[in-house]
Image (tube, rainbow, N blue to C red):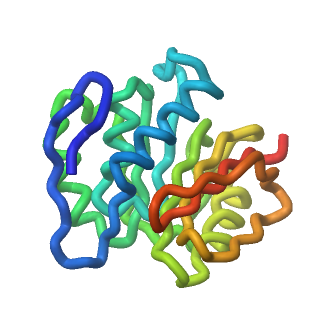
Amino acid sequence: MRIIGGKYRGKKLFSPDNGAVRPTSDRAREALFNILRSRLGNDLEKYSLVDVFSGSGAFALEALSQGFGKVALIDVDTHPLLKNVALFPDEKKKINIFKRDALKLEAAETPFDVLFMDAPYRKNLTVPALENLCSKGWLKPKALCLIEVEKDEECLLPSMFEKIEERRYGLAKILIAEVAG
């Protein structure tokens, strides 16, 4: 696993070997960052991203490499992502780590512009986590949301989300949505 673009392109990341973490593929990450740039423009420094069920932290660290001004990583097990975050000592001020259950978050200090969520497949965690993120103020109105689920998994987004489109990459389906504003 590696960073695929931006300032740290080619930097190798630790891949968890326990099977509990399933990183988003390089191909999907590349496509998602193309979508982000087409919707947000090339100046990503002014945007913040929250990576929920962050696992290895690869997506949030990719966001830093690609120019995001601030990232947050949320997971109940931060051990895999801490190893990768440690590879970016110059970016410490831009990274916040929350060892939390995404279904039981407290109110956010500052809402985020972009959400990436990749919950464990077929555990029915995506919708309750999305509802909790909104009710606790983690997402700005009109926040752009990239929500990964298994390609055959049915996922009806909560009413405060407007689905824009969906894409498929291998075993993954990405729902692209926006928080109602």
Residue 95 coordinates in the image, percent (x, y): 34, 40
Where residue 7 sits, quadrant-wise, is top left
Question: Relative to residue 16, is residue 89 depicted above or below?
Answer: above
- The structure residue drawn at horizontal position 62% and vertical position 42%, both measured from the top left corner, is 111
91 or 8, which is in the foreground? Answer: 8
152 or 131, which is in the foreground? Answer: 152
Q: Quadrant of the C terminus?
A: top right
- The structure residue drawn at horizontal position 67% and vertical position 53%, both measured from the top left corner, is 166
Question: Relative to residue 122, is residue 106 depicted above or below?
Answer: above
Answer with left or right where residue 72 lies relative to residue 95: right
Residue 114 coordinates in the image, percent (x, y): 58, 40
- The structure residue drawn at horizontal position 19% and vertical position 36%, both measured from the top left corner, is 88
- The structure residue drawn at horizontal position 57% and vertical position 61%, both measured from the top left corner, is 173
Answer with left or right where residue 176 lies relative to residue 93: right
Q: How many marks?
A: 0
Q: Residue furthest bottom?
A: 123
Residue 76 coordinates in the image, percent (x, y): 38, 71
Question: Relative to residue 162, is residue 7 depicted above or below?
Answer: above
Answer with left or right where residue 35 lies relative to residue 93: right
146 or 136, which is in the foreground? Answer: 146
Where residue 112 sits, quadrant-wise, is top right
